[in-house]
Image (spheres, rainbow, N blue to C red):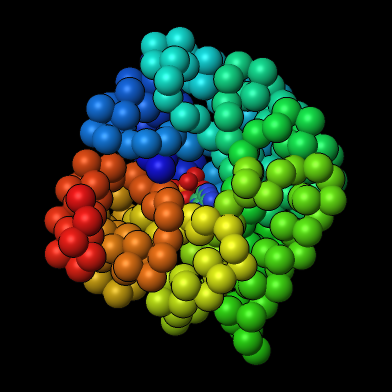
């Protein structure tokens, strides 16, 4: 999954793709590099990020989704949002997936997803982006993440989202300390045991900077690839990444060597 942040303040590429032109060009480049799926977002979820209105988010995201799909009608595009209005408008212009970092906590979001019969990514986060790094202690980290995701899946199913349209994500970097992030990646198989494909998004996140001593953006590519390969090895089905070509090349060789597949 290639990341397209149409925001002024995303932690690693904020401002680079705020205008529709550069954002669309970036999205097309990620597809050319081998992304199977694009994730278009209009609100940063970095710790402490300022909230964005639905109108602003729609103005950022919808033109990009529409134009990418006009130029590449077969592309798979998700909208990275926790607002039902934004999801609805993105779906109307062709987004087939809703990626919600709040795990479809909002009942209206569940209704929008069920009605439109789209695929949903349900992610674990404790609190909100504003507060999530204030308390990062867990008694049973993986158990808590599993329980939250299982509960949110049950709510999504009850709202009418089909089971084969649900993916789960442990939320690397969302209200977790360094050790918790590495543990969640190492324990991906336990998240997969819930019975849904697992998405892991570790790309360029701060725990990689802590481990490698590297600052944000491109300097964290190598560390991010390390996390991506580990997640794949432990059963992740989708890797949410900024650096598609480098990750894809590493994954091709790595999977061939560890499993003998293409
Ligand atoms: N991480 C970010 C945003 N959305 N969605 C899922 N499913 N999983 C993630 O790990 C995830 C996500 C944060 O990364 P990024 O989009 O690069 O930054 P920002 O939120 O600052 O725009």
- The reply to whether residue 130 is visible in this rendering is no
Does residue 116 appear to the left or right of 217 in the view shown?
A: right
Residue 254 spot, x, y in % from top left: 19, 61
Residue 100 spot, x, y in % from top left: 64, 46
Q: Nearer the viewer, residue 221 or 18?
A: 221
Does residue 258 appear to the left or right of 16 in the view shown?
A: left
Does residue 181 appear to the left or right of 113 in the view shown?
A: left
Q: Nearer the viewer, residue 24 or 162?
A: 162
Count the marks: how many?
A: 0
Q: Nearer the viewer, residue 201 or 256?
A: 256
Residue 171 spot, x, y in % from top left: 55, 62
Question: Looking at the rendering, which quadrant does residue 88 occupy?
Answer: top right
Residue positioned 61% across, 67% down in the render: 194
Residue positioned 64% across, 72% down in the render: 146
- The reply to whether residue 162 is visible in this rendering is yes
Residue 160, relative to residue 261: is it above or below?
above
Q: Nearer the viewer, residue 87 or 212?
A: 87
């Amino acid at each position: 999954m290639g990341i397209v942040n149409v925001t002024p303040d995303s932690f690693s590429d904020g401002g680079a793709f705020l205008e529709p032109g550069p954002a669309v060009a970036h999205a097309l480049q990620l597809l050319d590099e081998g992304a199977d799926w694009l994730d278009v977002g209009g609100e940063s979820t970095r710790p402490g990020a300022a909230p964005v209105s639905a109108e602003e988010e729609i103005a950022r995201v919808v033109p990009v989704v529409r134009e990418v799909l006009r130029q590449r009608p077969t592309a798979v595009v998700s909208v990275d949002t926790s607002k039902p209005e934004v999801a609805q408008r993105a779906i109307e212009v062709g987004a087939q997936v809703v990626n919600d970092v709040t795990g479809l906590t909002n009942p209206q979001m569940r209704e929008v997803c069920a009605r439109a019969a789209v695929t949903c990514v349900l992610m674990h986060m404790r609190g909100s982006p504003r507060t999530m790094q204030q308390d990062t202690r867990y008694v049973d980290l993986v158990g808590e993440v599993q329980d939250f995701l299982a509960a949110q899946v049950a709510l999504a199913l009850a709202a009418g989202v089909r089971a084969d349209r649900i993916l789960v994500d442990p939320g690397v970097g969302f209200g977790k300390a360094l050790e918790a992030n590495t543990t969640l990646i190492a324990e991906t198989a336990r998240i997969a045991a819930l019975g849904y494909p697992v998405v892991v998004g570790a790309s360029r996140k701060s725990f990689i900077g802590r481990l490698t001593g590297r600052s944000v953006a491109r300097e964290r590519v190598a560390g991010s690839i390390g996390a991506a390969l580990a997640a794949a090895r432990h059963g992740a089905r989708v890797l949410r990444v900024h650096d598609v070509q480098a990750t894809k090349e590493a994954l091709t060789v790595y999977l061939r060597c560890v499993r003998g597949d293409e």
